[in-house]
Image (cartoon, helix red, strand yellow):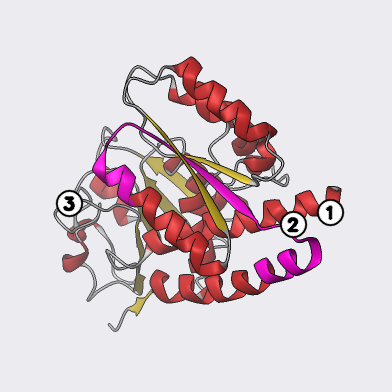
Amino acid sequence: MSAVILDGKKLAREIETSLADRVRAIIDGSGRVPVLATILVGDDPASATYVKMKGNACARVGMESKQVRLPETTTTDDLLAEIDALNAARDVHGILLQHPVPSQIDERTCFDRIAVEKDVDGVTTCGFGRMTMGERAFGSATPLGIMTLLDQYGIGLEGRRAVVVGRSPILGKPMAMMLLNANATVTICHSRTDNLAHVVAEADIVVGAVGKPEFIRGEWIKDGAVVIDAGYHPEGVGDIELSAVVDRCSAYTPVPGGVGPMTIATLISQTVDAAERQLARD
């Protein structure tokens, strides 16, 4: 079987081309430049790399990136004050708090302090609730990027059995709700699910979002399934043993180059959306 490679890198480039046109229209029409504010707390090198990548993406489409760097010793109150200032800033259209934050910080409280209209990474409980109920909200960036990828490659979801392995509030849970809203029949699993291999074997669409290298074995996945790997680990692999399934599945996301670029493209796209909405209100 010749599997379709769901090339997130290629699609992200196409999205950026379209976004650059929209950014130019915003600047020409208002004289304002869309701005994404990124908050990085501490010195985690991987997080710093992710923030840099997002800043580079902003530059590619003509946006600006406002970077806020805070020390490892930052408290919850300190971080909330920074978020409040960005919420109030008229020249900031989107806010990204880079995950994870140091352990002394109440991350959920800080996520939920982000104004819903600037929650372009889709991390607030209010945004999640609105998305789940089919109301307008910015979706969690990685799941929404996956949905865009599936749509652009013509992967049908209605009536199909989807299994999401992972239950994090910014990946597994919103992924499951987006698939459900697209009329898939969804099962959410995790590392403690009994007989996980049997559940995965029933899936037409498998989403690996568990955060453990190659935790989902290729032999569990049935022939012809669509395989979405949302993980990336220092070993250069994702959450799914892709090497054991690429010759049997109907489509898959490569690691790297699949889901990751779509996450950033979605974040930038939603920032442009936020800027356009603000201008419409002004």
Q: Is residue 99 left or right of residue 179?
A: left
Please report contact status of discs 2 and 1: CB closer than 8 Å, yes or no: yes
The residue located at (28%, 35%) in the rendering is 43
Instruction: Tell me the kind of residue under disc 1.
Output: Ala
User: How many neighbours does mark 3 have within 10 angstroms: few (below 14), some (14-19), or many (20 or more)?
Assistant: few
- Vertical comparison of 56 with 200: above or below: below
Q: Can the viewer see residue 146 in this picture?
A: no
Q: Element type at marker 3?
A: loop
Q: Nearer the viewer, mark 1 or mark 3?
A: 1
Q: Indicate the quadrant where residue 119 lies.
A: top right
User: In this image, 134 relative to 96: left or right?
Assistant: right
Q: Foreground: 98 or 157?
A: 98
Residue kind at label 2, given as amino acid type: Glu
Residue 280: which numbered mark, if any? 1
* Mark 2 lies on residue: 276
The magenta-colored residue range is 23-49
Marking on residue 3: none
- Name which of mark 2 and mark 3 comes first in the sequence: 3
**For residue 202, above or below residue 48:** below
Q: What residue type is labelled 3?
A: Pro
- SS class, disc 1: helix
Decide: few, some or many residues near mark 2? Use Cα within 10 Å; few <14, some 14-19, many ≥20.
some
Image coordinates of residue 51 in percent, x first then y, are 39, 49
| Residues at marks 2 and 3, CA–CA distance in whole angstroms | 37 Å
168 shown above or below 5: above
Lateral position of residue 269 relative to residue 160, left or right: right
Per the model, the C-alpha gap separating discs 1 and 3 is 43 Å
For marks 1 and 3, the one nearer the N-term is 3
